[in-house]
Image: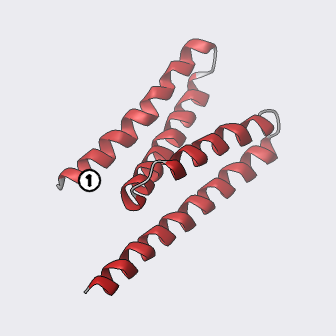
Amino acid sequence: MKRTAVAIIVSSLTFGMGHIINLFTGQTSFETILQVIFAVSWGFILTLVFYKSGSIFPCIIAHSMIDAFSMFGADNALVDQIYVVVTIVVAIVYCIYLGKIKEDVKKNEN
């Protein structure tokens, strides 16, 4: 496995595992496990965005927006579901966009 792939995986896992601390704040085990899975997924996406774009600023903006928007749906299950779906769709679209940009740049360099 390439060093880059290992670094992306380790970074994603440690980002997600950092959210285990919520067990000590009174959050249930089930909620914490879901949050860790969500965080590992977002850790992967944000690490990939950083790797592909070469900039940490999109990651900072995305993480800030995730945290801010999660406050609005804290007590509403429908808003929580919409939030999760929208963030996943935006992340996938952005990763595809970044992938195409890098491919186009490489094609123009050849």
Q: Position of residue 4 (x, y in %)?
A: 24, 53
The residue drawn where x is 60% and y is 47% is: 61
Q: Quadrant of residue 88?
A: bottom right
Q: Amino acid at mark 1?
A: Ala
Query: What's the residue at 56%, 23% (across, down)?
Result: 29
> In the structure shown, which secondary structural element does the residue marked by tag 1 occupy?
helix
Along the line of sight, the residue nearer the viewer: 54 or 93: 54
Quadrant of the image for the C terminus?
bottom left
Residue identifier under label 1: 5
- Across and down, in percent, residue 19 comes to 50, 27
- Measured from the top left, where is residue 42 in percent x and y? 50, 46
Residue plotted at (64% across, 14% down): 26
- Left or right: 11 in relation to 2: right
Determine whether 97 is above or below 54 in the image: below
Residue 84 vs residue 53: left or right? Answer: right
Residue 28 as seen in the image, left or right of residue 49:
right
Q: How many marks?
A: 1
Rendering quarter of residue 100: bottom left
Residue 28 x, y percent position in the rendering: 62, 21
Q: Quadrant of the N terminus?
A: bottom left
Q: Residues within 10 Å of mark 1 (few under 14, many from 20)?
A: few
**Which of these two is toward me, 67 or 25?**
67
Taking depth in this image into account, of 50 and 73 the one nearest to the observer is: 50
In the image, what residue occupies the spot 68% across and 57% down?
Answer: 86
